[in-house]
Amino acid sequence: MRYTVLLLLILSFVTPLNAQEFKLGKINKEHFEIPLSKEEKAAPAVFLNKYRRTHFEYRDDLDGWLLYTTVHEVIKINSISGFSYGTKKIQLFNEGRESEAVKKVEAYTYTIEDNEVVKIKTPKERIIKNRINENLDEVTITIPAVKQGAIIEYKYTVESSYYEIDDVIFQENIPVKNAFAIIESPQFFDYNKFIKGYRDILSNDYVKLRQENASFELRNPFGGRTSKTLTNRIKYNDIVSEYHLQDIPALKEEPFVNNMENYRIAVVYELATVEFKKGIKEKRAKSWDEVAEYLNNPARVTGQVDRASFLDGVSDTLKAKSVATLDRMNFAYDYIQDRMTWDRGVNKYRSQDLKKAYYQKKGTAYEINTLLVSLLKRMGLQAAPVMASTKDNGIPIFPTVDGFDYAIAAVYYNNEWILMDASGKNLYPGLLPERVMNWEGRLLKENGESLSIPLFSRKHSDNKSSIIISVNKKGEMSGKCRQKYSNSEALYIRNILKGEEQDYQEDILKEIISENNVYDVVFELENSSKPTMISYGFETSNYTKIVDDKMYLSPHLFLEKSENPFKAFYRELPIDFRYPRIVENIITYKLPEEYTVDSMPEPLELKLSGGLGSYKIAFKQVNGQSIQVLSSFKSNSTLVKADAYNEIKNFYEQIVAKEKEKVVLIKK
């Protein structure tokens, strides 16, 4: 992923389109005639204009600075699937005295009837506020009369007492013709800026003088308002950044991407310092060491680990079983994993109660894995918590506390850290779930420092199949298959099959291999630390075709790679293969006595540059009536740069083409 820090002064700048060309409530025929590209016409809808202004205003010495963000967007609806853009949802956060509120909401629908523009205003009863939870409200604007060819428009302002500036998002899931944003921050607030996505963004940065009336009030003994006593006019500088982008393509889903939001074109603002008093700056942005110092606090992670004295009895019992490090690690892991159930709740480290979670036998991933760290340390092992961000949460691109939404455990053994997550019943030490295989985590060391820990898997996950098949003169097949899965491949199988009824397990198997006539099915799923095994018999006639005196056989059966997952002509996003993988297949055919081999495909061996992966396949005749197909696919990397896309696309094209080739049998 490429992230570039914006310069404060950029000389090269394109003069933006005047946002007033789209005045609220003033859409006319010319707006309906704005030319659209082929891609924009094909999209469900298109943003004709996307405007945002964020600025601060000073209210008084009690409320202080308030942040205002005004949004004005104009969207043309191209098809029925674009009707969903007629509903706009605005989330508002509230916590204690900090709050957000939406102001000045207006929305319209425009259509052309009898060669005239008809405007319909959204009534107030279609603007509804709902409580999502104690800290989150949601305002929904439901715009009426949305139909194909219509233009919808809405404008609103969010007033916030938070100083965090929301990401300036330019790219949407539909094309954007024109986007303009202006961010104004007083000299007292210093923000770092980061570009996200795969497009250069230039800004016009300048400073302008502002004057504002500031009211100062006497306070009662409880800190509340009394009466205004003084109004001063203050002068200060606003730091202004203007952004103008045009013809932004839709963010399209692509295969093998961990989280599309990581690549949406945007500018991320991070509050670095605040100067509430002249010459006294409060630092907000942190280095990773400062993040570690914050979390390694008696009131936070470290304190919770150290205060879990209720684990002392369990620790003594488990320690008595063995003095070996690996034994003790496994004892502690198995105990916490067996006892605790992940409630799939918010995994933040704030407001957690380890003791309550322990006795209720359920909790968040943070609670479960922090309990594990505490137990490991009490058993004499060098253990530490690792703060992480799940794929759904995104990748922290700068030192952050709130960027983490998950925690795992780590034990230092044999000069390396073994990572563990006890929140999943089918996991084991050294194997993480895919949700947390996301770039890097931060390990919190006892000395207050932190350490970067890669979360990608370094072990290959195996998927190996061995099939023996008999083919009769009618092309009907009867076979036995045994499949072996390890590491993440085994975890996937266990997660969908373990603990289910046999009938359900067999139905899932039939769906996976696209065969209904399956029998003698045996699943070996129980021991999570060992490979998963599945064996079964099957009968089918789906992979042969007889024409005259020849039988055409599809040699890879249901294991064939039927299509290339990489179809796009061009790709900008990295390719996420999830984890290193080895797929090996050995298929042995016993041919009918009436036929002999006429031809078999040529062998093929492919290698990706840089050791990214390989593929090879061979066909051989074992004896007069048996042939064997051996194939091996190996992927060695998790995240691959888009530079390798064309090579990888061609690699898969050759594999798909090769596996479609037939073995030809001819009557004797």
Image (cartoon, rainbow, N blue to C red):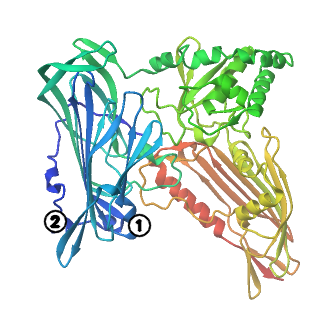
Q: Quadrant of residue 601?
A: bottom right
Secondary structure state at the residue bearing disc 1 = helix
**Label 1: how many residues lie within 10 Å, few (<14), some (14-19) or many (20+)?**
few
Side of 294 relative to 469 (left or right): left
Q: What residue lies at 53% left-to-right and 33% top-to-bottom?
A: 405
Q: Nearer the viewer, residue 192 or 601?
A: 192
Q: Is residue 417 visible?
A: no
Where residue 504 appears, as percent x and y from the top left, is 78, 59
Counting from the top left corner in percent of width and height, residue 228 is at 18, 21
Q: Nearer the viewer, residue 414 or 534?
A: 534
Q: Amino acid at mark 1?
A: Ser
Q: Amino acid at mark 2?
A: Asn
Which residue is disc 2 drawn over? Answer: 28
Of residue 653 and residue 167, the one placed in the foreground of this image is 167
Element type at marker 2?
A: loop
- Image location of residue 95, percent across then percent down: 42, 30
The quarter in which the N terminus is drawn is: top left
Q: Which residue is mark 1?
A: 81
Instruction: State left or right for residue 137 relative to residue 124.
Output: right
Q: Quadrant of the C terminus?
A: bottom right
> Who's the residue at 35% across and 46% down the image?
265
